[in-house]
């Protein structure tokens, strides 16, 4: 959409705006990233603070920066199979 801004930058003391990318040009992505316990705990603490304060949350996962809006839906999913169980903490939102 013309007129929408995705970022504001500075060059030689002057601010400039970069237009938003159209969502249709976003690459599809489906990854799982393992983190050491200490890094995961830090991310979860920052996420919990953002949720509690009603603020958006910024996170970088496998090299990509993601902004999770404050209005994201949060749910917990539990799956049980023959040989393993899984719990997912899931945040979803519309683009």
Image: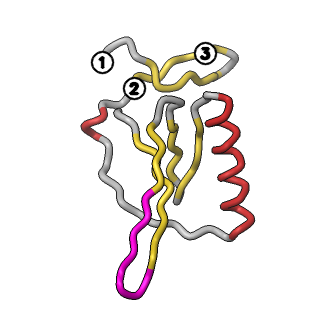
Q: Which of the two labelled residues, at mark 1 and mark 2, occupies the earlier sequence position?
A: 1
Q: Which mark is residue 62?
A: none
Report the residue that reaches farthest toward the left.
Answer: 24
* Residue beneath disc 2: 20
Q: Is residue 39 left or right of residue 64?
A: right
> Residue 40 sits in which quadrant?
bottom right
In the foreground, 88 or 35: 88
Q: Which mark is residue 15?
A: 3
Query: Where's residue 33, x and y in %?
Result: 51, 66
Query: Where's residue 70, x and y in %?
Result: 53, 30
Q: Is residue 80 left or right of residue 87?
A: left
Query: Where's residue 51, x and y in %?
Result: 62, 36
Q: Which residues are magenta?
A: 77-84
- Mark 3 vs mark 2: give the one in front: 2
Please tell me whether mark 2 sits on a helix, a strand or a loop.
Answer: loop
State how far apart marks 1 and 3 are (Cα): 21 Å
């Amino acid at each position: 959409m013309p007129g929408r801004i995705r970022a504001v930058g500075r060059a030689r003391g002057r601010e400039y705006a970069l237009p938003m990318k159209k969502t249709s040009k976003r690459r599809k992505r489906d990854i799982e990233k393992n983190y050491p316990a200490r890094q995961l705990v830090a991310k979860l603490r920052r996420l919990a603070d953002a949720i509690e304060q009603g603020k958006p949350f910024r996170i970088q996962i496998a090299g990509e920066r993601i902004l999770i809006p404050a209005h994201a839906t949060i749910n917990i999913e539990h799956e049980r199979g023959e040989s393993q169980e899984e719990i997912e903490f899931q945040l979803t939102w519309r683009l």
